[in-house]
Image (cartoon, grey):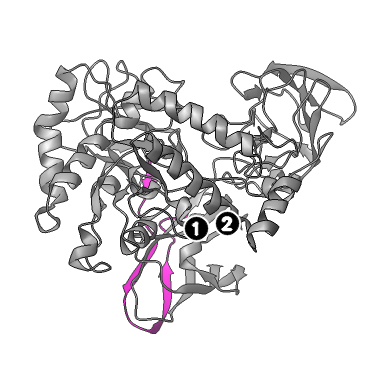
Amino acid sequence: MLLIRKTKSVQGEVKNVWCVGREENYQILDSVIREFAGMFPFEYIHVAGDEVNRANWEHCPKCRALMEKEGYTDSFQLQNYFFRRVEKIVEKYNRKTAGWNEILKGGEINPNTLISAWQGISYGIESAKKGHETIMMPGQFTYFDMAQSENERGHRWAAITDTKRAYSFEPIPDNELTPDQQKMIKGVQGALWSEYLDRPGRFMEYQSYPRIAALSEIGWTKKEDKNWDDFYSRLTHSHLQRLASMGINFRDFPPTAIYKSGSITVTPPYDGAVVRYDTQGNEPTRASPLYTHPIPTKDYENYLFRTFFNEVSASPAVKVEKLPVANWNTSKVEILNISENISENVDKKGIWYLTFNPTSDEAISGAVRAVSLFENDELIQSYPEEKTLKSKPRLRFVIENYNKKNTYRLDFTVENKEAKESSAKVNFNCSSYLEPEVKVTSSMAENPKFPISKLEDYNAETYLRTDVPCVNGDWILYTFTNPVVSSKIDVLTGIPHHPRFIINDGHVEYSYNGIDFEKGDSFDYGNASIYPKQPVKAVKIVITGTNNEQLMAAQDLRITP
């Protein structure tokens, strides 16, 4: 039934594709669909069709023979052949076919087939223009397994999707479709895929609510009647209490904490919100101090703040932010030369990151270049090359000679080459971690798209993927050029922010001389920590068993001073 060649899908799986050239497979599918139709008295049967690993077919003799017989020139046509045959089986049992938007590729399909447009708004537009009834469910807005903020658990491949972003989605793109084509948009749908809902407890509810409330509103509200402020007011003044009364563990809205002029000022997310905080970098609990007034401190990086609705529901913990050091907003074709005195923002030596963050998905036109940081009018570092705003540039600077009497200036150029919106906030923040030069080696072969060098760049969003499963005896070795003084080193495995391809069985070791190693913590849900008593020369991941996956992933070390 399945191909034996071990080409991997986008999820890293193998042997998960039907062979299109095996006639007996259609007999199996007939039996499955017949039984399914007998069990469920519904109008549609969804036949999927997303993320098919077509490389299997390209290496399969039976599939290649079918392509030659039918005169096909690419494997999308083979995919179309498969789904047209599946459609006929579904029709045979008096049902209609539904499928993901990928089944539109490779040729025509039955005009009665319903399309679930998940990859983006443009795919829903394409479906409607081709005359198919369409459900709009773009992952960028309606996939509720997406993380709701940068520091929360969840996927990120589509977007960071909080309640406000979900509410911003307009299911009927009236500027792109004629009135008749608009009628093909039958509704909007959310999705919550379950692979990362195992922890913490009741996480499914946390990921669902109140985003489901936003989904409902955009489904039944006319475009001209949508109003975020009105919706948010109703949510926070009545509907959250309704959810609480129903016993639902919803995600409350987080506060905003801003550090300026030696003081942290917190803005609660709504009137009456209860905000508590921790001063040691731990997640606040219901027993933590209550925020009542601005907090004078120099150690703002150690503070975390969190909203508590009741004994069950709370917001994520948030870090203290600084105000942007620069911003711009233009829709003209123009060049902006921006120079800002950022002396008030710089308050210590260390590694600093300058980030350019578009204010919306639409405000990504243009590019930045000639980004320079000056200390007392002397150049510290410059990045002359052009970087698109869409790429959200993140630039690294090292401030070694900080003195509170020093002055700091940031210069950069923005060029908007088209009459489209270009708008961004520019933030400059000191890293909480050390970034010593390190060389990483491993017993396992790397995936060329996720090479082992990603473990040397100290970018929290990049990571290593091996090209093989991990087994007992495998290892990853981090060797520092110079011994590192640190109070704590966190060793993280898996994809950043969610536990896919983690190490289940293994431990960390560390060495003060690069030769003799001491055993540290065992891995707990993919993570382990080291608390060295001397400068560390090397850190080693030691694997003692499989993780039952097709590969494993690892991240940069997090080295606390």
Q: Earlier in the sequence, mark 1 or mark 2?
A: 2
Which mark, by number, is residue 76?
2
Q: Is residue 366 visible?
A: yes
For the residues labelled 1 and 2, say whether their Cβ atoms are less than 8 Å apart: yes
Comparing 368 with 430, the one in front is 368
- SS at circle 1: loop
Q: Is residue 107 left or right of residue 123?
A: right
- Between 11 and 553, which is closer to the camera in this rendering? 11
Magenta-drawn stretch contains 338 = yes
Q: Residue 521 location, x and y as percent?
A: 68, 17
Do we see residue 16 in this rendering?
no
Place of residue 392 in the rendered image (x, y in percent of width and height, measured from the top left)? 48, 60
Does residue 335 appear to the left or right of 19 in the view shown? left
Judge the density around disc 1: few (<14), some (14-19), many (≥20) Cα neighbours within 10 Å: some
The quadrant in which residue 345 appears is: bottom left
In the rendered image, the residue lying farthest to the bottom is 334
Q: CA distance from mark 1 to mark 2?
A: 6 Å
Label 1 sits on what residue type?
Answer: Lys
What type is the residue that disc 2 sits on?
Phe
The residue positioned farthest toward the right in the image shown: 515
| Quarter of the N terminus within the rendering | top right
Hey, which quadrant is residue 559 in on the image? top right
Instruction: Residue at 72%, 52% (x, y): give it.
Output: 65
| Residue position marked by numbered label 1 in the rendering | 105
Classed neighbour count for the residue bearing mark 2: other residues with Cα under 10 Å, few (<14), some (14–19), many (≥20)? some
Residue 477 at x, y percent in the picture: 80, 34
Q: Residue at x 25, y 35 (%)?
A: 212
Q: Which residues are magenta?
A: 319-346
Which quarter shows the C terminus? top right
Horizontal and vertical percent for residue 78? 59, 53
> In this rendering, is residue 183 above or below 46?
below
